Image: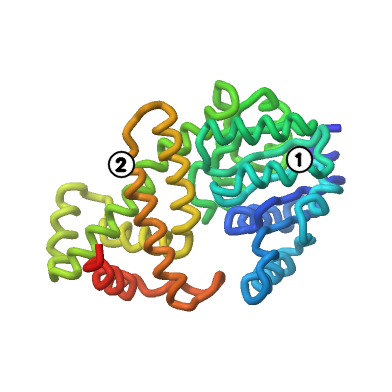
Amino acid sequence: MAIETQSKLKQQNICFIGYGEAAQAFTQGWSGTIDISISAYDIRTDIEGPIRDNQIDAFEHNGVLGHMNSCDAIEASTIIFSMVTADQAVSAAQAAAVGNIAEKLYFDCNSVAPQTKQKARDIIEAAGGKYVDVAIMAPVHPNLHKTPALICGPHSNLALASLQALELNVKVVEGDVGSAAAIKLCRSIVIKGLEALSAEMMCIAQTLGVEESVIQSLDRSHPGFDWKTQSNYALDRMMVHGHRRGAEMGEAVGMLRHHGIPSDVSQATAVWQNRVAELQAASGQIAGEPPMLVDDVLHQLGRKSQAY
């Protein structure tokens, strides 16, 4: 039976499919405030070596019962959060559908196109689950589980009660599954695109030795934005999460093409996001370590740009 009150929710398990930054932030936000047990599965446990070790450490550090497959993680749960990279959203739904999901709420929090959410919905609903489209509308730090989110779909009222019992900051938007995703992904075209534009601008400005003059000019044109800080922050996010952001922008490209709209800018954004992430990966650092210094990344990108 679906859970609608906090008193009942405390007696149940929460399951995460995908246990990266967002899932860990939610867990940390709940720590000491809500009495629940949490299980999780992450595809990184399938990779032998430091990546698997880091993932297991993340489970243990956050008091989460980690599993080696999604079916085991789902078994005792009543609420499932899917928080994977955009390119894995449908695969995660397919894996979950094999498990015991009948009558369970399945919160798809992944940044994917509306048509991708609808495909995942069909998979989950066919297996007896209750699919909810969730769009997390801001970085999960510093607000953790209280980061603003949108939900939609036929199970929205039940979902709202459950999420509010978990102290999430959620709002129901009108429309069928895909409406929340559309709002998030349209926004991402600007946010992720600005990150990519900032990286491209900073790279050439440093190469030509005009960075400070360019920043000062931008600050005069857009007072209060603080281009230096924002550009450095954007590049840092790309270093740490570029592959995830690149996959998200791939979904944006699919959304645009689905409606016959040119996707040139979103395609270029995906290329830049992945390029920065690959440079970070090539540094030999692994997940959990500090990213490369921004100046080092810009220097490397400047050198690599000669090949493009």
Report which quarter residue 291 is drawn in. Answer: bottom left
Q: Residue at x 77, y 33 (%)?
A: 129
127 up-or-down from 167: above or below: above
Q: Amino acid at mark 2?
A: Asp
Q: For the residue labelled by badge 1, is the local secondary structure a helix, a strand or a loop?
A: helix
The image shows residue 172, relative to residue 208, as above or below, that is: above
> Regarding mark 2 in the picture, which secondary structure is present there?
helix
For disc 1, the marked residue is: 97
Tell me the quadrant of the picture where the C terminus can be found.
bottom left
First in sequence: mark 1 vs mark 2: 1
- Callout 2 crowding tier (Cα within 10 Å): few <14, some 14–19, many ≥20: few
Q: Which mark is residue 264?
A: 2
Residue 279 location, x and y as percent?
39, 69
Q: Are marks 1 and 2 in contact (CB under 8 Å)?
A: no
Lateral position of residue 128 relative to residue 47, left or right: right
Residue closer to the observer: 71 or 142 = 71
Q: Is residue 283 visible?
A: yes
In the shown orientation, is residue 298 left or right of residue 11? left
Q: Residue at x 32, y 75 (%)?
A: 296
